[in-house]
Image: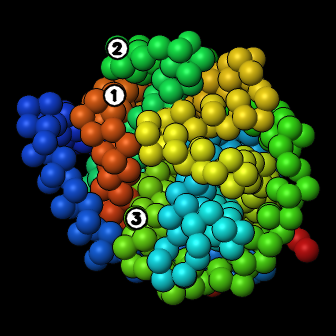
Amino acid sequence: MGHLPAASRHPINRPVFFIPLAILSAALLLSLWRGEAFVAAETVLNDWILRQLGPVFAGAGVAFLALLGAVALSPLGRTVIGGPGAKPLLGRWRWFAVMLCTTIATGILFWGAAEPLFHLNAPPPMLGLEPGSDAAATFAMSTMFLHWTLTPYGIYTVAALAFALVYYNRGEPFSLSSLFVPLIGKRAHGPVGTGIDIICLYALVAGMAASMGAGILAISGGIETLGGFAGGMPLRWAIGALIVASFLISAATGLQKGIAGLSVLNTWLFFAIIAFALLAGPTAHMLGLSLSAGGEYVSTFVPRNLGIGLDPDWSRQWTIFYWGNWFAWAPVTALFLGRLAIGYSVREFILMNLVLPSLFGALWMTAIAGSAILLDQQSGASLYAVISARGPDSVLFRLFDALGGGPAVTGLILFTIFLSYVAGADANVSAMSALSTRGITPDAPEAPLAVQSVWGVAVGLVAVVLVAASGIDGIRMMSVLGGAPALFVIIGAALSLAAMTVRGRPSAAPALPD
């Protein structure tokens, strides 16, 4: 039988493609037409979500880590994703690089230097810490460990592992509804499953737009700092257009060349930035701060995750916001991360998607957050003054100036931010496009480039409008709005993973012997 043409093999899944796109277009038009009213409504909804769902966000994150520990120790941990004869798509190093760049995008760059300064200079009043003190510094660093290591990666890993097992080992369709098959069987497919795909696709657009908005702000802040001028919105539009064009070019080259190649380069650049910060900064003090903060992180792990012993408003503004943001990305990102997992065991998957990126996050925060905290303490809160005067956009560049980086290092960081978002967006647009296309299989995993182009441009437009209309506050709220519906999908994925763990395997596929 001859090969079908691409359009016939991959027709658009019309409800999943057009409904989120229509909702997105309506939201964009409304924000342009009635910007202040739109932001006010967004604020009310955001506050309601954080208040009502905050305990669920927090409790789920802790429960997922316990579940992954049980999975790793259970017979399911020996199961090879795709079966014992399955061949991996990527080697371990390229797999790690793609996973890292798909999940952190620009967030770790934008917030790694800016966020700890808030915690250092405005710690939760309930703790009674003096702003700028050593105790506040320890709290700031332990909070960075909380927000950027085990808990968020646990959210991704649960969803991605559940999808990998149902997609490769059970042969279910490339759809988020497949996550529910271990719970309710084939009834998961149909109108309810289509509704899940629609909601999660919209949630990821919200999360991606928020991340891209942060990236645009960071890159424009760096260019303005380096060039000594104010580029304003024209500069931000140009950056957004360049990012979209770049990841669409990368998408056209496929996983092995485009996404994997960009991710490997980006990961090496991350390690170069870490090395520079460790060598140029107060290394001994940074390591000492990291050790003391690590002890606090371990001793307060459960209560801080749950927001116990902290001001509720502070916990909602920071910790619950982060969990909402990670949940917004998790469903559709899980499709891509699960696709990468073929040929590896469940335990290897947990190591690669939970343990190693958490260690990387701790190393990054030791170098970047540690430098920012200590330099801010030594300079009388000069970096925090930059945030107060100009916002968090340019703090990372001011930090590396203070470390003696100069224009060359600023240029390197600018390129890394740009590449980081391109690599992450490439992977997620690939998953979004596949989700809104029929006929995706392990042998034909890519959606048509035209579908990827539509989603890429849509994300770019939402990001730039967010930046123009409401800046960083609007970006943060957009993330949470996407996370609310995604929360229940990931809880369903966790229940499916728990069911497979109890059974010992996802299907009739054999496990590896001990």
Q: Position of residue 476 (x, y in %)?
A: 38, 50
Q: Report crowding for label 2: few under 14, some 14 to 19, many 20 or more residues within 10 A (C-alpha).
A: few
Above or below: residue 90 compared with residue 135: above
Q: CA distance from mark 2 to mark 3?
A: 31 Å
- Numbered badge on residue 234: 2
Q: Report the colour scheme.
A: rainbow
Dot 2: element: helix
| Residue 151 visible | no
In the displayed structure, does residue 503 sit left or right of residue 198? right
Q: Residue at x 44, y 36 (%)?
A: 390
Return the disc, 2 or 3, that comes first in the chain's sequence.
Answer: 2
In the image, 513 versus 413, the foreground residue is 413
Q: CA distance from mark 1 to mark 2?
A: 10 Å
Above or below: residue 58 compared with residue 217: below
Amino acid type at circle 3 is Gln
| Residue 30 visible | yes
Residue behind mark 3: 317
Q: Residue at x 44, y 45 (%)?
A: 388
Q: Position of residue 490 (x, y in %)?
A: 45, 66
Amino acid type at circle 1 is Val
- Disc 1, disc 3: CB below 8 Å? no
In the displayed structure, does residue 237 sit left or right of residue 407? left
Return the disc, 1 or 2, that comes first in the chain's sequence.
Answer: 2
Above or below: residue 184 compared with residue 332: below
In the image, 460 versus 385, the foreground residue is 385
In the displayed structure, does residue 477 sit left or right of residue 360? left
- Numbered badge on residue 464: 1
Above or below: residue 1 compared with residue 84: above
Q: Position of residue 188 (x, y in %)?
A: 36, 65
In the displayed structure, does residue 378 sit left or right of residue 17? right
In the image, 191 versus 101, the foreground residue is 101
